[in-house]
Image (spheres, rainbow, N blue to C red):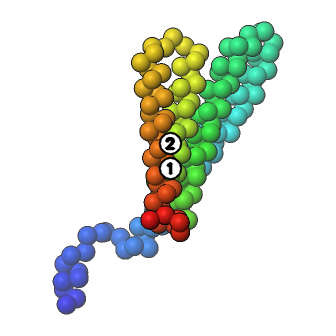
């Protein structure tokens, strides 16, 4: 019986090594994202000061809104990584949250550039579809005691 078990061993490392390596890689990704958020925050403050001096408030607001939406998407991505480290899997709702923040950021950025009405309708459709998927995943979640 033991020969069958050894013959079908698929991994080079055992499960403990595999989990440790994955946790290390995810931890390194989180540290790099924390650094990215910190640098983004510093750049927002620098841009705020720079645009205040140049009296180009509208361009500064556009840049700041885009940067803040990117930082929010990164924070949502950190939540996905934390979920993976804590429970060993990624919840679909968290992934949908990340995509929703990114898509809403894209819609906001359309406001400040030349856009086609088809792009706006496509963006609104995508956000609506993602919101519907988010509601469905909450309704039929295994953790929801009121669902089906």
SS for callout 1: helix
Q: Position of residue 88 (x, y in %)?
A: 48, 65
Label 2: how many residues lie within 10 Å, few (<14), some (14-19) or many (20+)?
some
SS for callout 2: helix
Q: Position of residue 44 (x, y in %)?
A: 71, 28
Residue 98, numbered label: none
Q: Is residue 117 above or below residue 12?
A: above
Residue 131, numbered label: 2
Q: Is residue 71 above or below residue 22?
A: above
9 with respect to 30 (left or right)? left
Spatial distance from mark 2 to mark 1, Cα to Cα? 6 Å
In the displayed orientation, state which residue is furthest to the bottom: 1
Residue 135, numbered label: 1
Residue located at (68% from left, 39% from top): 38
Occupied quadrant, residue 11? bottom left
Do we see residue 133 in this rendering? yes
Occupied quadrant, residue 117? top left
Q: Are marks 2 and 1 in contact (CB under 8 Å)?
A: yes
Front residue (pair 31, 82)? 82
Q: Is residue 125 above or below residue 147?
A: above
């Amino acid at each position: 019986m033991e020969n069958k078990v050894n013959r079908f061993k698929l991994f080079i490392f055992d499960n403990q090594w595999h989990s440790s390596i994955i946790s290390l890689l995810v931890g390194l990704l989180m540290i790099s994202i924390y650094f990215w958020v910190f640098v983004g925050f510093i750049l927002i403050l620098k841009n705020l000061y720079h645009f205040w001096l140049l009296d180009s408030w509208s361009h500064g607001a556009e840049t700041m809104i885009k940067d803040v939406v990117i930082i929010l998407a990164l924070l949502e991505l950190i939540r996905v990584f934390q979920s993976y480290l804590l429970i060993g899997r990624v919840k679909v709702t968290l992934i949908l949250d990340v995509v929703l923040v990114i898509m809403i950021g894209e819609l906001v950025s359309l406001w400040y550039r030349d856009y086609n009405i088809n792009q706006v309708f496509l963006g609104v459709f995508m956000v609506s579809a993602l919101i519907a998927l988010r509601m469905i995943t909450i309704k039929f979640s295994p953790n929801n005691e009121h669902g089906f």
